[in-house]
Amino acid sequence: MVKKLKAVFISLSLLSSFVVADINDDIQRKQAQDRRELELKESLKERFKLQTKQQTIPKQQVKAGVSDSGKCVNIKQINTSKQSLIDTQLINDLKQKYQGRCLGVKQINQLIKELQNIYQDNGFVTSKVGLAFHKPNLNKAS
């Protein structure tokens, strides 16, 4: 009888040590999972801060009704390239506003500023709008 009780106590103590080890493993897994979730939340907060900073980039000053008293250039067509990710209606509306008009330097600068703002509003904060000039062929004899 005493031998049976000793065997029961020994088996209970061994079994309890295995149960405690399993509980410790579960606690460690839970703590590791909590740490990963906390790191993910902090990463998302940091990403949000960066996105917020990008959204607060100052826009180009656009003035209404800019007129030029000097020389002007007849603008027949405005071409844009690599703008497939931006709503084409925004670009087309801007083109209609300036195409077919004689624009001075101030008005051309105004056009560039408005186009730059469209790009910034659509997340292209590092893009730069510029002009491409077609060089005339001077080697050709008339």
Image (cartoon, helix red, strand yellow):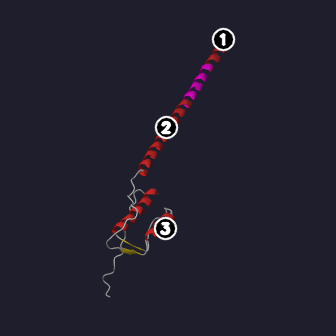
Who's the residue at 42% across and 59% down the image? 117
Q: Secondary structure at mark 2?
A: helix
* Magenta residues (range): 12-25
Q: Secondary structure at mark 3?
A: helix
Horizontal and vertical percent position of residue 120: 43, 57
Q: CA distance from mark 1 to mark 2?
A: 53 Å
* 15 horizontally vs 39: left or right: right
Q: CA distance from mark 2 to mark 3?
A: 46 Å
- Viewer-side residue, 18 vs 130: 130
Horizontal and vertical percent position of residue 32: 51, 35
* 47 horizontally vs 11: left or right: left
Horizontal and vertical percent position of residue 112: 39, 64
Q: Which residue is mark 2?
A: 38
Task: Locate the C terminus and report the quarter of the image it occupies.
Answer: bottom left
Disc number lying in front (2 or 3): 3
- Give the residue type at disc 1: Val
Q: Residue furthest top?
A: 2
Question: Could one spot residue 67 in this view of the protein?
Answer: yes
- Give the residue type at disc 3: Asn
Return the disc, 1 or 2, that comes first in the chain's sequence: 1
Say whether residue 17 is magenta.
Answer: yes
Q: Which residue is mark 1?
A: 2
Who's the residue at 45% across and 49% down the image? 51
Q: Which residue is mark 3?
A: 92
